[in-house]
Amino acid sequence: MKRRQFIRVGGYGAAGAAVAGGLTTDWYGRYGNPTADPGTDGDRVVPSFCELCFWKCGILAHVKDGRVTKIKGNPKDPLSNGHLCPRGAGGTGLLYDPDRLKKPMIRRDVRGSQVFEDVSWDDALGVVAENFERIKAEHGAAALALFSHGYGGSWMKHLVKAHGSPNIAAPSYAQCRGPREVGFDLTFGAGVGSPENTDIRNARCLVLIGSHLGENMHNTQVQDFADAIRNEADIITVDPRYSVAASKSRWWLPIKPGTDTALLLAWMNVIIGEELYDRDYIERYAYGFEQLAEHVKAFTPEWAYPRTGIEPDVIRRTARAMGAARPATLVHPGRHVTWYGDDTQRSRAIALLNALLGSWGRKGGFFVPSQIQLPPYEYPGYLKPDAQAADRPAPSDYPLGDQVLAQGVCDAAITGVRGDSAIKAWMVYGSNLPTTLPDPENTYKAIQELDFLVTVDVLPAEIVGWSDVVLPEATYLERCDELYNPWWREPYVAVRQEVVPPMYDSKPGWWMARELGKRIGLPEFFPWKDSIEYAKTRLEAAGLDCEVMKEQGVIRGKPGPLYFEEGAVPEFYTDSGKIELYSPKLAALGFDPMPTYDHSKLEEPPEGYYRLLFGRAPVHTFGRTTNNRLLSEVYRENEVWVNRDVARRWGLEDGERVYLQNQDGKRSSFSAPVKVTGRIRPDAVYVVHGYGRRAPKLRFVHGKGIDDNELITRYKVDPIMGGTGMNVNFVTFLRAADVVEDEPAVDEPVVVAEEVVA
Ligand code: MGD
Ligand code: SF4
C-alpha cells in the first residue's frame, strides 16, 4: 500500500515514470528506499517539516551516528499523510551538499570584484548592525528593505519590522500568486491561501488552467489528484503544452498562450446560456448575476474560437461537463499566475466560473478551512514606520496590491526611479533575486547603487556573489523555526526542530535575528533564550503540550464542518457580504467590474520567434534544488521543448544544443538540448525554470541548461495589484555550434569565496 501510494504521488505519465524509475535504481541503492518500513534504522527519529519547497509537509528524519540517513513522511501530518514527494525524500542532498556556505564572509574589495574574507560571526554581525544603524540615522529606517522567501524568513521579518521599515517583500506575491489572491478576494471575500482550500480529491470535474499538477509537485495536491484520477473525475487541462496532467485528462485544450480569459468568458456564456449554473446558490449568495449574464452574452464559443484556437464544439462540451458535475466541479485557481499583466482579471474570471458552478464552500470544489487559535508571542508593539513602502510610484498605484511589491522595492534602489533613491540597504533571505525578479539587468543596476547588501543563504547562489556580508544559515534539518499553523482541511500546528546540529559555522535564522536585534538596540523584541523557549510560550498560551509536539511533530485539532451542506457557515467578506459577480469595488477604482478580453492587446511573436513559457520539474523547486546531487540523479539539466514542425523547419535534431536569444537581443548564457516533441504548440517553446546558473561555486549545476529569467527582459505590470506578467517574451534559436561563447561564459561577476584577503 505504501509503495503504491508513493508511486502514485511521483508517478504520472512520462515525467512521473522517470521519477519513480530513478528512485527505484540508484536512489534506493545509495540513500535507502523512502517507502521502506517506517521503523528507524538508526539511533532516533525526529519529526519536523520539509523546506525543499514551501508546502511544509511533515517529515520523520532518521538519524544514525549523527547523520541523517533517510527522510520519510510523518503519518500524523495532514499535509504529507505519511508520504513525501520525490524532493522531500532528497533533503539530505541539501544538508550534505559540499558547496554549502560554511562561514560568514565579508567582501574585501569593490562590489562586483567578489573577493571575500571568512570572518567570525561577531565581526560579520557587527558590520551588519553598524550599517543598519548608520543607514537608519542618515536616511530613516525605511531605507532598509528585506526580501524574504521561505519559512525561516519570519525571524528576519520580525527584526526588520522592529527596526521600523515597511519595505518587506516576497517574490511569491507579485511574481507568483498575488493576482489569484486578489481576484478571489474580490469575488468571495477570501483568497485561497497556501495550502489552497481546493477539494481536489472529491472533485468530479477538475479544470486545470496552466496548472501542471504532477510536474508542479505540491505533495498533498498530487495525492489528491491521484484520488481524483482513480475516482474517474472528468479532467480538463488547458495548456499550450501537453503536460503530464494533460496526459491524465479526458480533455486537453491546447490554447493559444495569453487567451485564457477569452475561453473563460465563453465557458460562462455557455454555462449561463444553457442554464447549467447553480441557480439556487447564485440566488442565495451572489450579487450582480444579471450584469454578468448580460456581460458574457457577446462572448460566444464562436467568438472565442479564432482567439483561443479552441473549437466551439469543444468549448460547449467541456462547459457541459463542468455543469453536469457541479457543485463538485473545481476550476483550479492555479498558483504561479503572473503571466500577461491582466492576471487579476483572469483569476477573477476563474473565480466567477467557480461561483456559477456553486463550488465555493462545497464538496469537490473549495472546502471551508479552519485553524487552531495560537496566540502570538507578546512583544512590545512595532513602531509606526517613518515612511510608506517605496514599492510603487504613487501610493494610489496598484490600489488592490495588499502586499509590498518586490519588483518595486528593487526599483526604489535606483536613483531617479522614485526621485532620489528611497532604498539604501537590502537584507536578502532565501531569495535569489537575479533569477527571481524579471529583467535581471535592472536588478544588478539596483544592487550596484546600494550602500549595503547582506544575504542570508545556505548555498553560494548568484545573489551571494553580490553581497557585502554573507551569513550562512543552517539548513531546515539543522534548525528550529516558527511554528506552522495553517488554515487547512483540519486545524493543526506543526513544529520544525533541529534534527542534527548545524554543520560548519552555520547558524539558525532565529539566532542571527536575535543577535542582530540586540546589537541594534532592540533587545525587548528578542526576550526569549532560543526558538524552543519561544515556541513553548506560544504553545502553552494555546493550551498545547510542548512535549507532545516535540514527540509527534504535529498536534491536530478537531475539524469543523468542511462544506456549506455540512453546516459550514456561508460567509463572504466582500462589501456586499455576497459573492460579487459584479465588483463595485473594481468599478469605483476605474477598472472593469467584470473581466473582459481585448485580443488586440496580445502581442504576436516576430517572424522566427516563439513565446517563451516556463514551469517546473517534479524533482526540483526552481533553482533551490538544482545543485542537489541526489535530486539531480533524476533530472539534471533542462531541455528546450520545440514543436516537431518547427524543429523540422529549423533542421533541429532532438538533443542538439541551442542557445536562446530573445526579442531584445539578450542571449542565454548557456545552451541546452532541444527536445523535439508534438506535445507543444508551434508558437511556443518551454523550459523548466531554475537552470542556466551562473554562480560557479554551485559546482554541480553551474553552466547546465538555460535560465529563462535572463531572457525575461520585458514584463507587463498588472494595473490592479502590481504583479509582473512574464510570459510576454519571445525567443529564437542559435545553434550552439555557431556560437562563440563569451569568456567566461557568464554575464556577471562570480563569487570566489576562497580568494581570501588576509
Ligand atoms: P507554473 O509552473 O508557472 O505554475 O506551479 P504552477 O502553478 O503549475 O506553470 C506553468 C504551466 O503553465 C506550464 O504547463 C505552461 O505550459 C503553462 N502555461 C504557460 N502559459 C500559459 C497560457 O497562456 N495559458 C495556459 N492555459 N497555460 C500556460 C507553480 C508552483 O509550483 C509554485 S508557485 C511553487 S512555489 C512550487 N514550485 C515547484 C517547483 O519549483 N518544483 C516542483 N516540482 N513543484 C513545485 N510546486 C509549486
Ligand atoms: Fe517537501 Fe515535497 Fe512537501 Fe514540498 S511538496 S514540502 S518538497 S515533501
Image: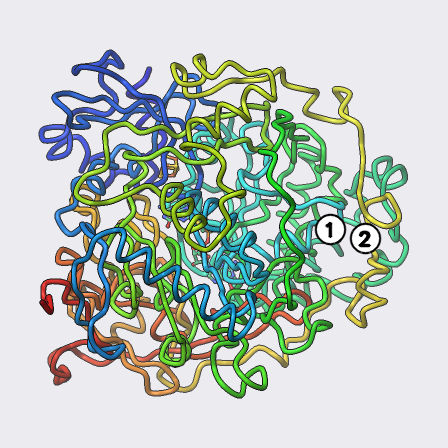
Amino acid type at image mark 1:
Leu
Is 32 or 233 nearer to us in this picture? 32
Q: Give me the residue at 32% from left, 38% from top.
A: 476
- Tag 1–tag 2 contact (CB < 8 Å): yes
Q: Amino acid at mark 2?
A: Leu
Q: Is residue 689 visible?
A: no
Residue 96: quadrant of the picture: top left
Mark 1 residue crowding within 10 angstroms, few (<14) / some (14–19) / many (20+) = many
* Residue that carries the numbered disc 1 in the rendered image: 352
| Residue closer to the observer: 605 or 52 | 52
Residue situated in front as seen by the camera: 507 or 515:
515
What residue appears at the point 68 percent right and 30 percent down from the top-left corner? 368
Q: Which residue is mark 2?
A: 581
x, y percent for residue 271: 75, 49
Image quarter for ligand 2 equals: top left
| Callout 2 crowding tier (Cα within 10 Å): few <14, some 14–19, many ≥20 | many
Which tag, 1 or 2, sits closer to the chain's start? Answer: 1
Give the vertical position of 658 relative to 680 (above or below).
Answer: below
Residue 242 pos. (x, y %) = 40, 54
Colour pattern of the rendering: rainbow
